[in-house]
Image: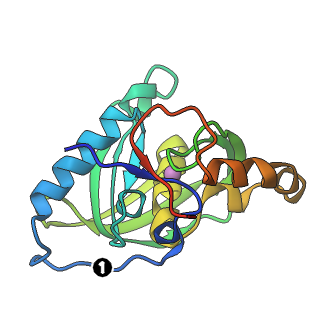
Amino acid sequence: MIYPINIIGSPVLRKVAEDIDQTYPNLHEFLENLKETMYETDGLGLAAPQVGKSVRIFVIDGSAIADDFPELADFKRTFINAHIVEKSEELQKASEGCLSIPGIHEEVDRHKKVRIQYRDENWQEQDETLEGMAAVILQHEYDHLDGILFTDKIAPLRKVLLKKKLERISKGDFEHRYKFKLGGK
Ligand code: NI
């Protein structure tokens, strides 16, 4: 099942998401649907709050850009109860976009290296350190669990310039490529 994507302005995108336990209803089905929705919308990743569920879950598949970033060829993961426990001081810049903010691409500073603890789709505990573009994608999806969007992190002047555009997007003024949900009104 393909979920509609919540667009900037939806309150669920601003909530801090919660951990789940194994009794979370229909977890397997939810993960399958989340992945299906990510592939259908051509996203490199998709976080549960983007489909209206305020839980600490996201999926990533970076293989679509493996031509440019070979290290992403095998970067396919399901993250449950994700918590970043270490970040490098050193930063890197990358251009980012987001299914919840269609049509906008901006440069963002991210930590070069992050260590994350989570459970995989088999409920196994994982502890992983990622760097480069994998770390960029990870931090973008992870921010969704804390109610943060990448446009919160762009340079102050760019933010001022984008304000009106983001307001228009929140009202549905963008190219409609996939099913979506507006939360503003
Ligand atoms: Ni996003």
- Residue 185 is at least partly visible in this image: yes
Quick check: 171 above or below 66? below
The N terminus lies in quadrant: top left
Q: How many marks?
A: 1
Amino acid type, mark 1? Asp
Q: How is the image coloured?
A: rainbow
Viewer-nearest residue: 127 or 161:
161
Quick check: 60 above or below 175? below
Neighbor class of circle 1 (other Cα within 10 Å; few <14, some 14-19, many 20+) is some
Give the residue furthest to the front: 185
- Measuring from the top left, give residue 124's x and y in whole percent: 14, 66
- Measuring from the top left, give residue 158's x and y in whole percent: 85, 50
Asked where in the image residue 93 lies, by quadrant, the reply is top right
Quick check: 121 above or below 177? below
**In the visual, does 54 lie left or right of 137?**
left
- Measuring from the top left, give residue 53's x and y in whole percent: 33, 67
Q: Which residue lies at the image location 40% right of the left edge and 36% below the top edge?
A: 62
The C terminus lies in quadrant: bottom right
Residue assigned mark 1: 19
Q: Which residue lies at the image location 11% right of the left edge and 72% below the top edge?
A: 25
**In the visual, does 180 lie left or right of 30?**
right
Q: Which residue lies at the image location 13% right of the left edge and 64% below the top edge?
A: 27
Asked where in the image residue 179 lies, by quadrant, the reply is top left
Determine whether the residue tagged by mark 1 lies in a helix, strand or loop.
loop
